[in-house]
Image (tube, rainbow, N blue to C red):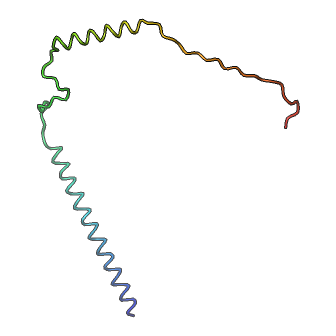
């Protein structure tokens, strides 16, 4: 009889501990969903003042334009050179072998 009481008591404590852990997990999920709802409801403007491409203005400076033109010219010269195409030959040497299959 005492063994049964001990088993029942242990089962009840296990169930209570699992219930507490589920309650904690549910509270954590509710907190996360509340944060997500808050972030979704927060209105943001189209321009947050953050310049992702770090450009101060839409116009390019003379130095930038000159450098880009020089690089394009150098690339155009480089692309006109003939390129060496690597070729390889594969020779298969097939000799008549045995006439009977193995």
Residue 44 x/y as whole percent:
13, 37
* Residue depicted at x 17% and y 26%: 54
Give above or below for 94 relative to 50: above
Is the residue 28 above or below the residue 80 in the image? below
Q: Quadrant of residue 6?
A: bottom left
Residue at image x 86%, y 30%? 98
Q: Residue furthest bottom?
A: 1
Towards the viewer: 29 or 60: 60
Examine the rendered structure and indicate whether residue 8 appears above or below residue 55: below
- Going 12% across and 39% down the picture, which residue do you hit? 43
Q: Position of residue 19 (x, y in %)?
A: 28, 71
The percent coordinates of residue 51 (x first, y second) are 16, 28
Question: Residue at the right extreme?
Answer: 100
Quadrant where the N terminus lies?
bottom left
Q: Position of residue 77 (x, y in %)?
A: 37, 6
Residue 76 or residue 49, whichever sits in front: 76
């Amino acid at each position: 009889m005492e063994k049964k009481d001990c088993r029942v008591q242990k089962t009840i404590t296990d169930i209570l501990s699992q219930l507490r852990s589920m309650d904690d997990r549910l509270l954590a999920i509710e907190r996360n969903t509340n944060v997500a709802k808050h972030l979704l409801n927060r209105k943001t403007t189209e321009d947050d003042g953050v310049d992702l491409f770090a450009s101060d203005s839409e116009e390019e400076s003379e130095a930038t334009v000159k450098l880009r033109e020089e690089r394009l010219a150098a690339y155009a010269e480089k692309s006109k050179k003939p390129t060496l195409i690597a070729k390889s030959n594969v020779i298969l040497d097939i000799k008549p072998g045995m006439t009977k299959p193995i």
